[in-house]
Image (cartoon, rainbow, N blue to C red):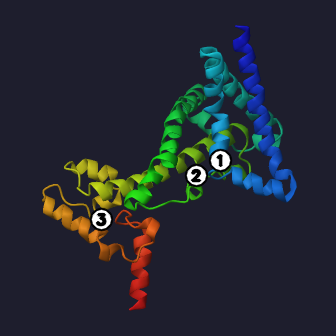
Amino acid sequence: MIPLLLIAASTLVSIAGFAGLLHLIPRLGAAGTRLGAWLCRAPGLDLVVSLFTWIPPTVLGIVFGWRGVVGSIIGQVLGMLVWMFAHELANRTHVNGPRIVSFLNRTVGRLNNHVALWVTALAVPVFIILRVAELCVYPILTPLVGLPRYRHADWVNVSRQKFNGLVGHDLIWCLYCDWMTGVYSLGAEMLRNVESFWCPIRFASGKKCDNCKLDFPDIYGGWVAPDGTMGDVVATLEEMYGAPATAGLPRDQRHPWFGHPVRMTVERKATNAT
């Protein structure tokens, strides 16, 4: 048990220390401000998230086996709790004011609220895998077939730490939501391109179409009806991705989904020119 406890303790200290360093960096003059801003947006944020999440159990697991994995996860959780306690201790005025956690504890019960929050933490590996796909898989499609390139920092970033009064417990969970919402949204945007480019055919289930239309506007914005023909599909592809339709698009955004903003921009420019 001693190695396990030592691993947990060292991870706790590392996590809490790194969190403290992140608080210190923006206070180190102009250079610190720039570095702090970089760490709040991809790719800097990817580094921060990696150091807080998958790197400790991976490295320690390789070195110490299962004890490294278990010990590091215990240390990560304890480090997070220590940071929350310290941050709330340093912001007593806000802690005594209105808080999200106080309202939700009253509404659904303290135990239910806290257990539910930690259950959501089980989804962290899912979002990390999605982020890896965004970084390593989708970019290959841009030079191969012309799917749009994206500036990841416009999606994957965090800013809720700037919200006045958001401290400790509320802050850490809001930052988690901030990060995962950006990762999910970027992934959905990439998938819109993939779907419309390779299979612009509406689902046979009307209920599924209605449920998915928010994330995939092309369902009712150009995809071929399920009772259509392959000739209709090819005609749609020609209309949206043929040379005349893409001639005015940037080279790294040649084949976007039907309702992509870049298409609207090109169309407006063409209209204004005439």
Task: State which mark lies toward you, 3 or 2.
Answer: 2
Please say whether residue 32 is visible from this viewpoint: yes
Q: Earlier in the sequence, mark 2 or mark 1?
A: 1
Residue 212, horizontal then vertical, whole percent: 33, 51
Q: Which residue is mark 1?
A: 45
Q: Is residue 237 left or right of residue 55?
A: left
Q: Are marks 2 and 1 in contact (CB under 8 Å)?
A: yes
The span from disc 3 to disc 2 (Cα, nearest Å) is 27 Å
The image shows residue 261, relative to residue 219, as above or below, that is below
Residue 255, horizontal then vertical, whole percent: 37, 64
Label 1 sits on a secondary structure element that is helix
Q: Residue 9, located in which quarter of the rendered image?
A: top right
Label 2 sits on a secondary structure element that is loop
The span from disc 1 to disc 3 (Cα, nearest Å) is 35 Å
Task: State which mark lies toward you, 1 or 3.
Answer: 1
Q: Residue furthest front?
A: 144
Q: Is residue 22 left or right of residue 52?
A: right
Residue 221 is marked as 3
